């Protein structure tokens, strides 16, 4: 989703801004722009409805120079993806220039007030309204005196403007009269300041800061930062000036590039043995046949008294929650409720004080997940996060939680974060199980199986060349069905999501037995079904469902974990994954599904890492 970068110092700003925007490209965007400023010169702006690479060419041609600048990648919300709507936006004929992430909900009424004062709008965005509001306030503040604009006027103008805003924002503001001042403000949309001695860097996540500084300040909600080359002052809406909390930039955020892979998605699929090892590291305790987590921030007694757990998230993270439901109910015997975060935030479920809430999120920035956790906290529940991005908004706001340690996930389609989430949820189920009824032997067995998991995933990756061939046969299909049961029902949903988001093929995941209640009407010789049919308690049942599809002429790609002559005869293609216990099958079976989606998307010429219309981190509702 939208990205922000900014620079103030002694060097040319544009190279950092462009490079920074490239680092943020993975979040998904449709237009981009930068603005820079030099003393006594008009502001220079370059914008494009397209890629940062195109913007970079424009910047070179137009020599967009200056030692202060701001930049943005936009994911359209208010108004289509056009050059006019791309940020930065100017307010008050150039008095201020801003970039903005988030959504201003009351922008129409604010705009009406500005139109009444004859402000002209060049775009349809909510952001331009904010730019004019700051400029308007600045004019008011200076009209009674000499007319000279001071830094304090700029701070006051930003503060009184944000006091009028309803919605979410991460704002970065540059002022015509100052080539050494940026003001940042945050409410619900992340901003990080990279601290250095005589220059400062700003971005909406840490990736553009890597290599420039190892000290950072995460701006919190209702904070405003006054950023100058040699100083940073942080002001809080209610507390006035506060001491900024300078933290070390985690080495986990440091991405090593493509490492020879054609795409980040492929690299991340192949990283899974390692990311699962990272999730497991230091958490398994064989002596007590349990798992340990440092950050749940609850006593053992409190955890024992939990009577219900709500698992919430969006998209792939919601699929993890569904697997978590099976795991926690089976291994820990705790009633689980899985809820889309976007629904939970507006529902009012009756809960008692022994209900624990887990928000599952890769980015830690998903607006709905954050809002759902806040709502649950407001109701007095302990709200925890299972999160990948260290220092993200959700990681900071949750009462505690568990990091995935999967490393940066750049491909828009989530892969390694999903399997790490499942690994963490399995350990969580083990932990809760051991607090209750689960025997030492049963706990130890789960640990042994978990320890084998990275190697199982490594072996599952060996199916890649076979999957590539299968992709060639089915890449032209216009609809796919994904079928699985029990633990592999969510696996089917996730397989379908991977395919639809990167190849734009319509795909549906179903619990296999649901087919006959409607979806089987879709089956014909042009509609392939991917049937996940490994050994386990529902093996025979899924086999019957597979037969039902075949009986109606539907091509079948079967995912199995042992050779079965019957499946071999029935299915058009069979992919064999390593055998494992049923509770780990969603991790292992996801590997061929990820690869299938990847290979089909490639054959269809799709932009695998940046699929159309999608954003990596969905910071709007
Ligand atoms: C799909 C995908 C999305 C995310 C969803 C939640 O591949 O990546 O469905 O899972 O937007 O994002 P996080 O996990 O960052 O909260």
Image (tube, helix red, strand yellow):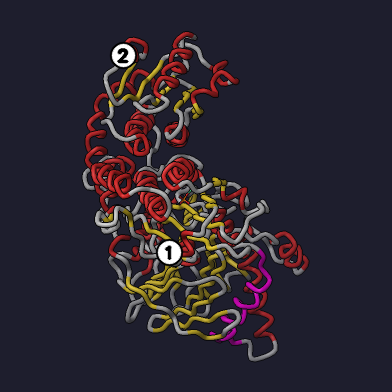
Say which residue appears at 46% left-offset and 52% top-offset.
361
> Taking the image as drawn, is residue 5 in sight?
no
Which structural element holds mark 2? helix
Q: Which residue, given by chain and number where applicable, does mark 1 sit on?
A: 300
Q: Residues within 10 Å of mark 1 (few under 14, many from 20)?
A: few
Residue span colored magenta: 148-166
The residue under the point 60% across, 20% down is 518
Q: Nearer the viewer, mark 1 or mark 2?
A: 1
- Give the CA separation, mark 1 to mark 2: 49 Å
Label total for image: 2
- Residue 157 is inside the magenta segment: yes
Residue 568: image tag = 2
SS class of the residue under badge 1?
helix
Name, please, the residue furthest toward the bottom: 146
At a point 60% along the width and 61% down the height, the residue shown is 353
Left or right of residue 505: residue 276: left
Instruction: Locate residue 23 relative to residue 146 in the image: left or right.
Output: left
386 in the magenta segment? no
Mark 2, other Cα within 10 Å: few <14 / some 14–19 / many ≥20: some
In this view of the protein, can residue 314 be seen by the observer? Answer: yes
Q: Nearer the viewer, residue 543 or 109?
A: 543
């Amino acid at each position: 989703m939208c990205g922000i970068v900014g620079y103030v110092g002694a060097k040319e700003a544009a190279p950092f801004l462009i490079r920074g925007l490239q680092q943020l490209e993975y979040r998904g965007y449709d237009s981009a722009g930068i603005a820079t400023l030099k003393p006594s010169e008009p502001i220079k702006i370059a914008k494009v409805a397209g890629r940062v690479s195109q913007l970079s060419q424009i910047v070179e041609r137009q020599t967009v120079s200056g030692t202060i600048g701001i930049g943005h990648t936009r994911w359209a919300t208010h108004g289509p993806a056009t050059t006019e709507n791309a940020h930065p936006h100017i307010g008050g004929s150039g008095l201020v220039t801003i970039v903005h992430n988030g959504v201003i909900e009351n922008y129409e009424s604010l705009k009406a007030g500005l139109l009444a004062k004859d402000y002209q709008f060049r775009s349809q965005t909510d952001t331009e309204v904010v730019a004019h509001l700051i400029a308007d306030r600045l004019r008011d503040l200076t009209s009674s005196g000499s007319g000279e604009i001071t830094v304090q006027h700029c701070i006051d103008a930003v503060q009184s403007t944000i006091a009028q805003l309803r919605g979410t924002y991460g704002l970065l503001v540059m002022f015509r009269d100052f080539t050494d001042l940026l003001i940042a403000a945050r409410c619900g949309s992340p901003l990080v300041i990279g601290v250095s001695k005589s220059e400062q860097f700003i971005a909406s996540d840490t990736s553009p800061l890597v290599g420039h500084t190892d000290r950072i300040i995460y701006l919190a909600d209702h904070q405003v930062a006054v950023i100058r080359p040699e100083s940073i002052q942080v002001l809080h809406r209610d507390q006035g000036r506060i001491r900024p909390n300078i933290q070390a930039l985690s080495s986990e955020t440091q991405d090593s590039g493509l490492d020879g892979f054609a795409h980040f998605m492929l690299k991340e699929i192949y990283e899974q043995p390692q990311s699962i090892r990272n999730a497991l590291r230091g958490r398994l305790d064989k002596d007590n046949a349990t798992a340990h987590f440092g950050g749940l921030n609850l006593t053992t007694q409190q955890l024992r008294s939990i009577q219900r757990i709500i698992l919430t998230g969006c998209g792939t993270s919601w699929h993890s929650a569904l697997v978590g439901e099976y795991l926690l109910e089976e291994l820990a015997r705790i009633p689980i409720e899985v809820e889309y975060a976007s629904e939970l935030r507006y529902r009012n479920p009756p809960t008692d004080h022994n209900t624990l809430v887990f928000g599952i999120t890769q980015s830690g920035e998903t607006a709905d997940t954050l809002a759902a956790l806040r709502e649950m906290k407001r109701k007095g529940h302990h709200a925890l996060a299972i999160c990948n991005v260290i220092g993200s908004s959700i990681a900071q706001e949750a009462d505690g939680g568990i990091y995935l340690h999967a490393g940066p996930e750049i491909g828009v389609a989530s892969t390694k974060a999903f399997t790490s989430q499942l690994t963490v949820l399995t350990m969580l189920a083990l932990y809760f199980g051991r607090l209750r009824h689960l025997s030492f032997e049963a706990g130890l067995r789960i640990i042994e199986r978990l320890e084998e998991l990275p190697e199982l995933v490594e072996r599952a990756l060996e199916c890649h060349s076979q999957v590539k061939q299968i992709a060639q046969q089915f890449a032209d299909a216009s609809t796919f069905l994904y079928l699985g049961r029990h633990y592999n029902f969510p696996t089917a949903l996730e397989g379908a999501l991977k395919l639809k988001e990167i190849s734009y093929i319509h795909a549906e995941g179903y619990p296999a037995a649901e087919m006959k209640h409607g979806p089987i009407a879709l089956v014909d010789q042009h509609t392939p079904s991917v049937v996940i049919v490994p050994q386990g308690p529902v093996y025979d049942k899924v086999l019957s469902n597979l037969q039902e599809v075949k009986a109606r002429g539907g091509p079948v790609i079967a995912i199995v974990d042992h050779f079965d002559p019957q499946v071999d005869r029935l299915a058009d293609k069979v992919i064999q994954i390593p055998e494992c216990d049923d509770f780990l099958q969603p991790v292992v079976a996801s590997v061929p599904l990820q690869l299938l989606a990847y290979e089909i998307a490639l054959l269809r010429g799709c932009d695998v890492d940046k699929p159309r219309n999608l954003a990596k981190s969905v910071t709007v509702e």
